[in-house]
Image: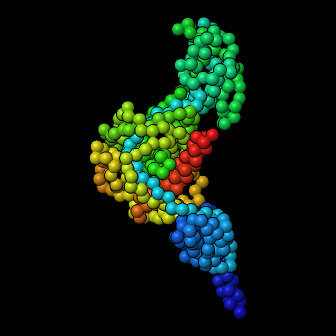
Amino acid sequence: MCNFFKTLSAVCTALCVIIFSLVYFGQQSIPDKITTIENSTYEINSIFGVSLFHLNYENEKGVASGTARASHSEAEIDLLNIIPVKTAEITNSKRKYVVLGGELFGVKLYTDGILVVDADSVETENGMVNPAEEAGLKVGDIIKSVNNEKVTSTKSLAQKIEDSKGEKISFSILRNNKSITIEFSTYKDKNTGKYKAGLWVRDSTAGLGTVTFYNSEKESFAGLGHGIYDVDTNEIMPMKKGEVFSAYANGIYKSSTGSVGELCGVITGKSIGKLCLNNEMGVYGFADTDKKEAIPAAVKQEVQTGKAKIYCTIDDGGVKGYDIEIKKIYSNSDSVNKDMIIEVTDKELLDKTGGIVQGMSGSPIIQNGKLVGAVTHVFVNDPTKGYAIFVDRMVDVTENMAEEKSVEDAA
């Protein structure tokens, strides 16, 4: 009898471990937010026996079978019809279509204010002084105005500093999205005789990237899959306006272990659109394209591990597809641009680039005939691998941007 109870106890313990493991697996693997597409079914892992189906876009109430009970916006997902696992938010969506990118583009971005990237001491008749340190100015601060007069370029800032003649001036700055005012002293440089603040600042930047897609219906585009960051502050560049240009590749520095390569290119003087947004999910703006054939954009639940292709431009051969493999998918990732891990498997691309290089960010990823994502980052210690973003995030940004523009136009 004692052995029987020992065996029963061991079985119960094992069952509890299995159940808790399955619940934990479900909590981690089942997305917190699920988008279902009209006239299609989304299958959750068979162990949970769940199938979510929406008949059409207009019918907001979904139909659920298995162990999910769907309302207008939620589905409770249970294990074996008994044990609650999680509640997922359900959104019914119409299938969206975009035009594939893959070509290089050049961008010039002008900051909204003057970005402080470094500070230095000024040599005066009385010794070295550090005006920025005295005032409490920090790297990453954005100077918006001087003495209540807006500054829009490094040149205008330098002129206001020179005009101060050593008198204290008032800086209105933006720091961590909060506006503050500081009093700033300038000093006469011993060597040049000019008044200086000891600041290194920036009001613009330029670079190359890859177009992910065009939303021809909205006349918009998306690229990079990650924001444009300042090289000194490692902060997203605060954008006032920007412009995008056509570009072409003219060389490659290959990636290798511990060293990320780079696509070399030339930005032409031909403007192809306006840049309107720079955020963690990429750069966005309005541009037209000669391409007309649209492909379906996947929602994240349609992305699978396995074979796929990236489309990019690495030479004068134009946009071309290369084999990759989607290794991991993070359905509930806290990051906004690291939703997948991908690996380059195409021999031609590996021979030419060593894997992922700078300039390939934004390269669209196609799987099962759908656009599923875009390349965002490369692994420095293994440049054959990198991160990618779900494309539905980027599509949503272009649509929201277009809606805001239409409201502004109507006003």
Task: Estimate the x, y position of residue 159 in percent, counting from the top left.
Answer: 57, 15
Q: Nearer the viewer, residue 407 or 124?
A: 407
The answer to whether 214 appears left or right of 12 in the picture is left
Q: Splitting the image into 4 quarters, where does residue 7 fall?
A: bottom right
Task: Estimate the x, y position of residue 103 in percent, counting from the top left.
Answer: 37, 45
Task: Estimate the x, y position of residue 228 in percent, counting from the top left.
Answer: 51, 39
Task: Estimate the x, y position of residue 217 in percent, counting from the top left.
Answer: 48, 51
Query: What residue do we see at 47% from left, 35% from top?
Result: 243
The answer to whether 134 appears left or right of 93 in the picture is right
| Furthest-bottom residue in this view | 1
| Camera sees residue 195 | yes
Q: Is residue 19 above or below residue 274?
A: below
Q: Is residue 327 above or below residue 21?
A: above
Query: What residue do we see at 57% from left, 70% from top?
Result: 54
Numbered disc total: 0
- Position of the N terminus, as image quadrant, is bottom right
Q: Nearer the viewer, residue 395 or 12?
A: 395
Q: Is residue 262 above or below residue 186?
A: below
Coloration mode: rainbow
Q: Is residue 233 above or below residue 297?
A: above
Query: What residue do we see at 59% from left, 59% from top?
Result: 332
- Position of the C terminus, as image quadrant, is top right
The answer to whether 343 appears left or right of 391 in the picture is left
| Furthest-front residue in this view | 410
Q: Splitting the image into 4 quarters, where does residue 369 fall?
A: bottom left
| Camera sees residue 343 | no
Q: Splitting the image into 4 quarters, where does residue 246 fall?
A: top left
